[in-house]
Image (cartoon, coloured by chain):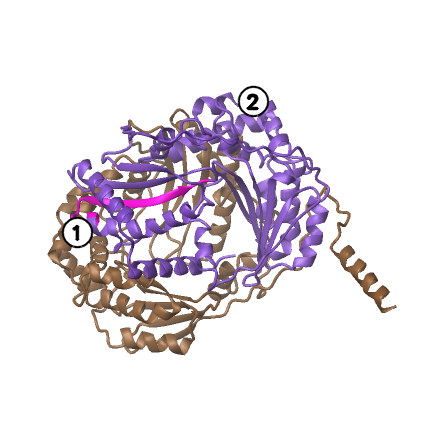
Chain colours: A brown, B purple
Amino acid sequence: MRKILFIAAGVLFISGSYAQNIDRSHAPKPGPAPVIKLKDPVVYTLKNGIKVLVVENHKTPMISASYYIYTGPVKEGDKAGAMGLMGRMLNEGTQHMSKAQFDLAAEQDGTSISLNSSGGSVAALDRYFDKGLGLMADALRYPALAQSSFDKLKTQELNGLKISEKSINTIASNVTSALAYGKQSPLGEFETSASVNNIALADVKDYYQKYITPSNGYLTIIGDIKPEQAHKLAEKYFGDWTGAKITVSQIAPVENPATTEIDLVDVPSAVQSVINVTNVISLPLDNPDYFSALIANQILGGGSDAYLFKDIREKHGFTYGAYSSVSGGVHQTRFNANAAVRNAVTDSSVMLFMQNIKKSGMVKSTRICSETPKRLSTATLRSVQKHRPNCRFCQKYYDLSPA
Amino acid sequence: MLLRSKGSLLIAGALLLSMASSAQEVKFTEYDLDNGLHVILHQDHTAPVVAVSVMYHVGSKNETPGLTGFAHFFEHLLFEGSENIKRGEFMKIVSAGGGQNNANTTQDRTFYYEVFPSNQLKLGLWLESERMMHPVINQIGVNTQREVVKEEKRMRVDNRPYGHLMEDVFKNLFTKHPYHWQTIGSMDDINRAKLSEFQDFFKKFYTPGNAVLSISGDLNIDSTKALISSYFGPIANGPKVVQPSIKEDPITHQIIDTAYDANIQVPALLTAYRTPAENSKDAVALQMISSILSGGASSRLYKELVDDKKTALEVASFNYALEDYGAYLVLAIPNGATPLDSLLQAFDTNIKELQTNLISEKDYQKILNQAEMDLSTRAIPV
């Protein structure tokens, strides 16, 4: 009897994972929405003002950390490229170790460290994290800033500029920002061989003093570590650091051209044209239109189901991809729609961009409602809850209850 | 590739998995359906998402000369719809379901995937089984995607600085084997491809027995198995796919070639060796050699050429490992007026050193640490 029960149970079990009849003619309905659980980071503030954020993730035996300094856009003027060079100089050894010693100390452990003009990052296996964080702190606090390294990097920078000189993407990106914001704005200036030639080691040292500091600093530690332990390490390596106070500079807002302007750059070697359709926008996160703008952009050019992709690629076959982007911030940002198209259809593609932008401006709200998912992404949802808890537009179209 | 991608091509493959597997184990369930479809399931509840993917054992090495680029072109056509999915609906269904998707093609295989919230597992299975069972490929799709693929080639290859480098290397390393040509193919061949040929290609290569379905994420193994039988079980298998078996003759003398590129101002020097297949032990050794030669600023070539002698702007070496053969590449971009000969000499001296002397115990520990770190980093996403 017992044996028979076992066999019956076995049969049941097998049939449990057997094929069921399904209806193929329609997309299957989703199951109940899963719950997204995101824990808030543990936050500490050091005496020098550095905010330490810790997120535990014990999936693999590694820990990563990043130090980020919010400097805001920095105007470099006729020395464009100086901030970037300063950031690269932080990877050139410290007052305690030559570059070769520093690189080997990290890489021997499989640790990766990189520094730039707004901080740096480190990733290491658990057993080497203490040492790795110490190395990153040493590079930030006591960089060698030697003349020989500066000469090497400056030559590399000048040669690197030559490599991208004929890249239509680089040209388009530089020219578009300069036209939109003006070359006088830190948002519109770009690096050239002339501006790099103007940079001296003293400029790098000056930028280092001003911008690599505990002021406006955020140390984020993520991985296989307890918050108390992370806090202790942050104190150990950053606790007694002092430096200049950062004041984020104001940037005068710029106006868009009164009528649509077309600017052309001839690149004879190119087999495609890069098209950017852009304008400058002021869209701080608390602007009542912030989320409407993100959603309108999603419909216009947010992906392969959006107007631009469906029309310029899927209907006309003019491009590999056409997209648009919009973002908000403290300073002015840009709306930008972009595609690379074969030369012969450049003008037709510009027409299609303009038509689709016009069309997206006339989208009725019912259409948004039926065509976009009813749930916002978790990140967006948290942002709405924090910045726009009473946003009527969002409440109308989205389920804003905590996921 | 069907859409632009934000990440870069990860050349360091699954080889490193075997090196540090003692420290970190990846659990999975693996079996075959009666129709030959190979299934791999991996459970991971870290985030409520699920990735559904199908890999077909077909790539540009299965193409015939005169129809290069065909396998990749075909990948684009499998987004055109099916008997139950109207043309243009595929992408809409994915994004309305809160998902993302893409596909890519190499010399050896074609890969399709969707990532969905985990309550949409069925939707992913339906989309992939529709694609395998009865896709609709028609003339309008062929005409449109032909132009899209040509734009992809212009953007990713023809207009990109050094974009033709791999093409120039592979046509010299391989003379008989289809690795001779690139996955993107030639403009002439892309123009030549016909609808009927695509339909034949589907019948020949897109069979369950020539595919691997792998699903990972927030799922239940038993109920997922049942769903897989429902969606994929009814698909009939086709004739067994015969993979090309083409032996190259040994390269007996050095080949020197110069290629020109209208997009660049600064030359690049590259040396290439034909190497063993990706699943050989040697391929793992070559991977380790890349760490020694150019993995990080303390590696031998980087330290010597970029930091000490300052003769190179950039130096890289890696094993481009494929199913039948590999290509080991060492390349550098000179800094300023550095003669290319001096870079070549440095490559040769360093390779000779590796051929003659063992690496130190310390170097060996460094490689192991780097491999463990690499695995830890890659094990975090679903």
Is B41 placed left or right of B102 in the picture?
Answer: right
When the figure is inspected, residue A169 is found, relative to residue B46, above or below; the finding is: above
Q: Residue furthest front?
A: B356
Chain letter for mark 2, please.
B
Magenta-tinted stretch: B305-322
Label 1: how many Cα within 10 Å (few below 14, some 14–19, many 20+): few
Q: Are marks 2 and 1 on the same chain?
A: yes
Q: Position of residue B274 (x, y in %)?
A: 37, 36
Q: Position of residue A274 (x, y in %)?
A: 36, 35
Q: Residue furthest right?
A: A1
Which residue carries the number 1 mark?
B308
Chain letter for mark 1, please.
B
Determine whether the residue tagged by mark 2 lies in a helix, strand or loop.
loop
Instruction: Examine the structure image and report whether residue A99 is included in the region drawn in magenta.
Output: no
Amino acid type, label 1: Asp
Label 2: how many Cα within 10 Å (few below 14, some 14–19, many 20+): some
Quarter of the view holding residue B337? top left
Which residue carries the number 2 mark?
B194
Q: Position of residue A194 (x, y in %)?
A: 15, 43
Instruction: Examine the structure image and report whether residue B315 is included in the region drawn in magenta.
Output: yes
How far apart marks 2 and 1 lie (CA) works out to 55 Å
Instruction: Tell me what residue is drawn at x 37 percent, y 44 percent.
Output: B319
Is B247 placed left or right of B342 in the picture?
Answer: right
When the figure is inspected, residue A169 is found, relative to residue A95, above or below; the finding is: above
